[in-house]
Amino acid sequence: MSIIIKPVISEKANYLTDLRGSYSFLVNPKANKIQIKKAVEAAYGVKVADVNTMIYAPKVSSKYTKKGLQVGKTNKLKKAVIKLAEGEVIDIFAVN
């Protein structure tokens, strides 16, 4: 099971990084905070101080067509906000 899906790159995520040293990642919805902490520490070689998680429900949309009502939905997402220990930094844009 892959824990970390991708880092979140947005204005709010960059603001949190500059202000608090927190980084945002999309993670597997079945992963818990301990697994997320270990995965980030292993992937980036940093010391994680705190993990906060948020679960986003799927968004449902529907429209009327000739064939009737068409209903679709997006996937459920889980976002983790990682706070690093003092002096630790992750370079998200580094080329591996």
Image: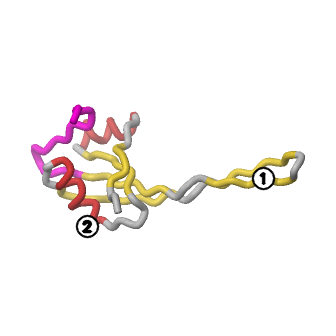
**Quadrant in which the C terminus is drawn:** top left
Q: Nearer the viewer, residue 20 or 7?
A: 7
Quadrant of residue 54 within the rendered picture: bottom left
Q: At 82% across and 54% down in the image, what residue appears?
A: 69
- Sequence-first disc among 1 and 2: 2
**Few, some or many C-alpha atoms within 10 Å of disc 1 (few <14, some 14-19, many ≥20)?**
few
- Name the residue carrying label 2: 34
29 lies left or right of 83: right
Q: Nearer the viewer, mark 1 or mark 2?
A: 1
- Name the residue carrying label 1: 70
Q: At 25% across and 67% down in the image, what residue appears?
A: 34
Q: At 34% across and 58% down in the image, what residue appears?
A: 2
Residue type indicated by callout 2: Ile
Secondary structure found at label 1:
strand
Q: Are marks 1 and 2 in contact (CB under 8 Å)?
A: no
Percent across and percent down for residue 23 are 28, 45
Is residue 93 one of those drawn in magenta? yes
Percent across and percent down for residue 84 are 18, 50
**Few, some or many C-alpha atoms within 10 Å of disc 2 (few <14, some 14-19, many ≥20)?**
few
Is residue 16 one of those drawn in magenta? no
Q: CA distance from mark 1 to mark 2?
A: 40 Å
Q: Which residues are magenta?
A: 83-96
Percent across and percent down for residue 13 are 35, 40
Which secondary structure is most common in the magenta stretch? loop
Percent across and percent down for residue 10 are 40, 36
**Residue located farthest toward the left when viewing the structure as drawn:** 87
Residue type indicated by callout 1: Gln
Q: Nearer the viewer, residue 31 or 53?
A: 31
Q: At 27% across and 40% down in the image, what residue appears?
A: 17
**Quadrant in which the N terminus is drawn:** bottom left
